Amino acid sequence: MQAQLQSLTALQKAIFFKDARNFQIVFLSCFLIYGIWNLGWDVEINRYTIIFTSCLITQALAIWFLKIPAHSLKSALITSLGLSILFKADSSLALAMGAFFAIASKFIIRINGKHLFNPANFGIVACILVTEQAWISPGQWGSSAVLWFIVGSAGLSVVFKVGRLDTSFAFLGTLFFLDYIRNILYLGWDFDFLIHKYTNGSLLLFTFFMITDPATTPNHKWARYIWSASVAVVSFILQNKLQVHTAPLWALFFVSPFTFLFDKIFVAQKFEWIKISNK
Amino acid sequence: MKTIIKKTMLFVTLLTYSVQTYSFCGFYVAKADIKLFNKTSQVILVRDGNRTVVTMSNDFQGNAKDFALVVPVPVVLKENDIKVVKRAIFDKLDTYSGPRLVEYYDENPCYNYYEYSYNFSSRAIPSSSKDKMTLEKNKDDKSYGVTIEAKYTVGEYDILILSAKESVGLKDWLILNGYKIPETAHEVLDPYIKSNLKFFVVKVNLEKLKGNEFQTLNPIQISYESPKFMLPIRLGMANADGSQDMIVYAFTKTGRVECSNYRTVKIPTDRNIPLGVRPKFGQFYADLFKKVWKYENKNAIFLEYAWNVSPNFGGMKCDPCVGPPPIYSDLKEAGVEWVNPNAMTNPNVFFTRLHVRYSRDKFPQDLLFQVTPNTEHFQGRYILTNPAWGGFECDAGQEYLKNLTVKRKKEVEELAALTGWDVTAYIPYITELNKYIKDKEFKKNDFTPVYGANPYDNNHQPKIIFTIGLSLLLILLMIWFNKLHKVKA
């Protein structure tokens, strides 16, 4: 490993710290390890193996056939980790399908050279709809202030790097505002009702690691404000009207197809993970 | 070492280890100044799509005229939606799914195996009192903003479905009609009224009760269509100090039920404990639960049992069984509407038992549930190992005794970690075999148990291997993937 490290050129080392995806990989794996050590999650080696294998093979095939940059395997690794901490299924086939859907969606569902859905988001939702054997457990993280701090700061550092802070805050701010009006001002719950809700680890992960995906959010800053606020509004409606406890995930799924419209109205340059690579 | 299961016995009825108080998803209100002390309630939840059947046990032991119950419900229930079912269903489900103690018998490595037989024993559930009751006439008053949406008499109960415009009016109406409810109740009632929930208000009908020989009030079963799959525990906290226990028995077609706004955690299971625990297994489990509850910061929900109980399911329905698994008639009684004894095949029935101990400070939100397709079986199971009998002169026998001593030390340490008990009294249990062990060096070992704080499995090996493996894999992959950037150096 040492030899490999030394063999990296100075520029490659620079890329290592420039590419926010590396940070995402580190943080997401920390969350998985945290879950296993501190939240009593089962060590489901089989599940992780299936997810990782399915994601990486699908991505590798795409690289081979579509001649896209090989470093995009990093994105597949992020999706694998994201699925490992969120996505559960009762059968190996459903797991493999979810992972396949996630990665394949990037290459199949595209408009104007940009994929429509966040891969993990699409994989989970599609698998739940198709197999009916998959689910996510929004309660698995519990609510604790420490978690808020850890996920929040880890998320922030990634979000800062890719400059998608606006997405996180427009989403969380809008949702909190709506929830505050409904639950505190109107219904009259005590404030700790909201504290409990907003310290939920799943919501934080979504806010800082899923909705901020620069590849699937609108390119223009103002478009992103409106776009993420609309994810929050849809999420609020799903949650309060239809009692969907995993509402943000579904909201993102429903709003994502409109991203290209936002890009049409608000024109801006498309995001690239590593700008150097194309120079 | 060969071990053989010989016997299953002893189960914990939740009634045996908790003081009782009257509040489950709703809150019991008393008409007189009686002290309400039941701290455990039981609920059966059956969920199929948007249809929910809720059965609430009311093992009320005061004077029945003081019994009253208020539960927020999402819709105005029709008379057909309300049933009275037999208490026995709760006892049966509790017995079937309660934490279990299993005994293994070691085989003597020096001799042949002997068979022993034991009697099955189980604990009886204390019966509740037989009470007379009175019912006051409802003083309905629109000026309080309270509307009586429906009025039924079902079984021994008089039932009102109320809707209210505002909480103070509802509180005043309840007080005026002779219910004693906490002064602060309107604060909790408010969010339910504004969420457009109705109130299911129950009192006992004295005349219906007269001449009946039943010993306890029967559980009430309600059914409704609503996307809401939750238990309004906040209301139950209005008149209770400290924490309350609730056992939820859930039935679905697909798989486990889990809580979606609190963590659902498995209770520690498959742990070896000393033989001395047998007579106090109830206390053992109560203390175990308390320890784990504290360890989880008092705001998790515990999974105690999960199993496929479909009538058509060919596999084992428990391992070992402490009570018979629910059959057709039990499932029907519990509100599982999709099973039909005459049908060739039936959809699955998956059973989940959850145990929650909640208090106002740790549970600011009502419990929200979701049905998952998770069909993994689970049970809370604790293991006793009976030593082999006979002489242990042979080498294998000596080795067995040494291993057993080491094993017993672990059992005692497990006991301390699981329950937080002072286990000094168990030291002779560890060392009692020393007199048969010839190896003097072995006897010099320190057999004082080590106290552990973590009630969960202390075998960290899989976690360590996983952590190291994942880290190494990711480091290698990241180095490799970073090299794939086509950069001009």
Image: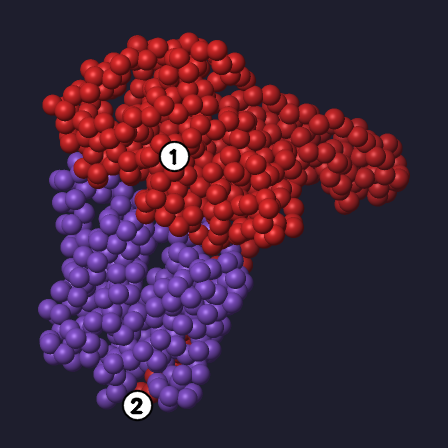
Chain colours: A purple, B red
Answer yes or no: do the residues labelled 2 and 1 have beta carbons within 8 Å? no
Q: Position of residue A7 (x, y in %)?
A: 41, 82
The structure residue drawn at horizontal position 30% and vertical position 60%, both measured from the top left corner, is: A249
Is any atom of residue A45 visible in this view?
Answer: yes
Vertical comparison of A3 with B159: above or below = below
**Left of B382 or right of it: where is B244?**
left
Near-viewer residue (B464 or B296):
B296
Q: Quadrant of the N terminus of chain B?
A: top right
The structure residue drawn at horizontal position 32% and vertical position 45%, both measured from the top left corner, is: B226
Amino acid under disc 2? Lys
Near-viewer residue (A130 or A21):
A130
Q: Position of residue B67 (x, y in %)?
A: 36, 17
The structure residue drawn at horizontal position 38% and vertical position 71%, both measured from the top left corner, is: A102
Near-viewer residue (A164 or B465):
A164
Residue B80, which numbered label?
1
Quickly name the residue at label 2.
B488
Q: Position of residue B124 (x, y in %)?
A: 60, 21
User: Judging from the image, what secondary structure is the residue with disc 2 in?
Assistant: loop
How many labels, in total?
Answer: 2
Q: Quadrant of the C terminus of chain B?
A: bottom left
Tell me which corner region of the image, top left, top right, bottom left or bottom right, holds residue B176.
Answer: top left
Q: Earlier in the sequence, mark 2 or mark 1?
A: 1
Vertical comparison of A148 with B471: above or below = above
Residue at mark 2 to residue at mark 1: CA–CA distance: 77 Å
**Left of B204 or right of it: where is B316?**
right
Is any atom of residue A139 visible in this view?
Answer: no
Amino acid under disc 1? Asn
The structure residue drawn at horizontal position 42% and vertical position 57%, both measured from the top left corner, is: A135
Vertical comparison of B30 with B105: above or below = above
